Image (cartoon, grey):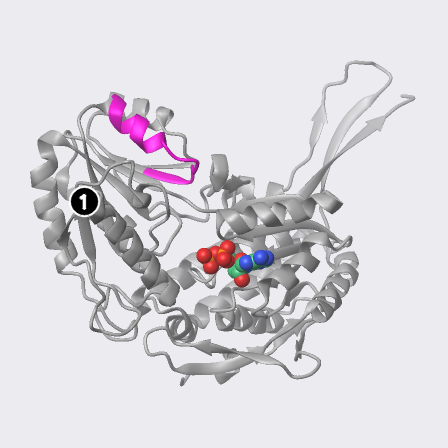
Amino acid sequence: MRLSQQNLLQNKSFINNEWVSEQSGKTFEVTNPATGDVITRVANCTPKETEQAIEAATKAFEVWRKKTAKERSAIMRKWFNLVNDSRNDLALLMTTEQGKPLAEAKGEITYGASFIEWFAEEARRVYGDVIPTPLNDRRIVVIKQPIGVVAAITPWNFPISMITRKISPAIAAGCTVVLKPAAQTPLSALALAYLSKEAGFPDGVINIITSDNAAEIGKVMTEHPLVQKFSFTGSTGVGKMLMQQCASTVKKVSLELGGNAPLIVFDDANIQQAVKGALASKYRNAGQTCVCANRIYVQDQIYNQFIQEYKKAVTSLKVGEGTQPGVEIGPLIDEKAIEKINRLVHEAVGKGAEITTGGNNHMAGKLFFQPTIVENCNQEMALSKEEIFGPVSAIYKFDTEEEAIRFANDTEYGLASYFFTQNLARAWRVAEALDYGIVGINEGVVSHAEAPFGGMKESGIGREGSKYGIEEYVEIKYLCLGGM
Ligand code: ADP
């Protein structure tokens, strides 16, 4: 891979501002999902290096927390500028290890960098409170302080933004971080680390541990007594287990887990808007996001019109290697993902669904799948309960608003939801009735650093981004001043 800054391609872990190998030199492969080629091998670290990183972060905490918010903010601002200036290299790196089209990768760098910028600004607004006293001889004051060392684990579908969304609020608050990226996409994480060193963070503020043994690294991160906070983005099953592990030391946890997003098209929707929104929500990152429309509910009266337009749009999506011009759908991450989609689609067909567009592996390569539409779906099918995580639209017909809300809420998940209507009263009514942390109204892409991202029910705990995001990384301390 030819980058204009070749130093962005790193293959060791990043501990205490140094590049560190696994003690005995063990490594694991990072491959390009579009071609199957090995890009490089990366240090396969163990609990030992993880503990080393936690100790470095603990030392660094004493230095970093004492900097003024303005000082922390200035270094973050430098990091933000460096990430933006390296956008083309970072995008190429991301497309090569993750597969998403180059244009989407560039979009993710901008989005990922926006968290650094936002929290560099928020660092200076962590206000406390003075509370009216119930007794004349005392005063009640609240201050906010950084919680301490943060451990974090991130997934492969957004190799940069899932990392900046956790690290930025943590370091803005004055915390230090040890993060393990997904084994499929460690290169983007290491490039970010390289740029953080260039930006001038003190030793040990940001540490990245690479490993393909997530369970053993996760165990250290969740059980280590020097870690005060654990933040995870990934599947609900793994999240539940990690939360349990955190119980032994009562760590504060933030979890961004799975979703099962409904997208409802009411008969009073603007059809063009609904088609555009559904397409963007469903097919971004080849359908591999936790906010992708997983169930598309379309009201009887406009069903045929919507489907006709939607099919046209889906059929014209260009599939191929992400570095090729004009490509809109890249490969899936691995063979397990292809197997899962095939299983879900075939199970649905066995229960009466009908494939009306696509439905097969794509000839672009082993990990490519055709943009697909499956109609006639119902709540009994596995694809209504599980995250599809691929370029497959599952379409359901519904009759009344009440029915649509009931179907939409019929899941243990509660991350993102979407609906399309031109009726203002319905917009409020439905938005209030949906049990989801995020509601897109006449919009299919809703993520912004300024807005709170997070789920209800089994989709998680806590919010990332926005003015709420930094709260996850501070402790509230109450000072009672007596003897006045
Ligand atoms: P996905 O289906 O997106 O890969 P996972 O929850 O398996 O979802 O992965 C998300 C992150 O969690 C990745 O960094 C992965 O390495 C990590 N992970 C997976 N299993 C475990 C585990 N048992 N303990 C700690 N981390 C894990």
**The N terminus appears in which quarter of the rendering?**
bottom left
- Name the foreground residue: 421 vs 285: 285
Q: Which residues are magenta?
A: 402-417
For residue 366, side relative to residue 129 (left or right):
left
Image location (x, y in percent) of residue 330: 29, 67
Can you say whether 161 is above or below 140 in the image?
Answer: below
- In the displayed orientation, state which residue is furthest to the right: 483
As for residue 415 lying within the magenta part, the answer is yes
The residue sitting at 20% across, 72% down in the picture is 363
Among the 4 quarters of the image, the one containing residue 478 = top right
Can you say whether 265 is above or below 69 in the image?
Answer: above
Q: Is mark 1 within 8 Å of ligand 1?
A: no
- Name the foreground residue: 336 vs 167: 336
Image location (x, y in percent) of residue 99: 35, 69
**The C terminus appears in which quarter of the rendering?**
top right
As for residue 176 lying within the magenta part, the answer is no
* Element assignment for label 1: loop
- In the displayed orientation, state which residue is furthest to the front: 350
Q: Can I make out residue 434 in this image?
A: yes
Q: Can I make out residue 125 in this image?
A: no
- Name the foreground residue: 6 vs 400: 400
Image location (x, y in percent) of residue 353: 18, 44
Can you say whether 238 is above or below 93 in the image?
Answer: above
For residue 19, side relative to residue 261 (left or right):
right
Number of residue marks: 1
Amino acid carrying mark 1 in the image: Ala
The residue sitting at 42% across, 57% down in the picture is 111
Residue picked out by circle 1: 353
Image location (x, y in percent) of residue 348: 24, 46
Among the 4 quarters of the image, the one containing residue 139 = top right
For residue 93, side relative to residue 424 (left or right):
right
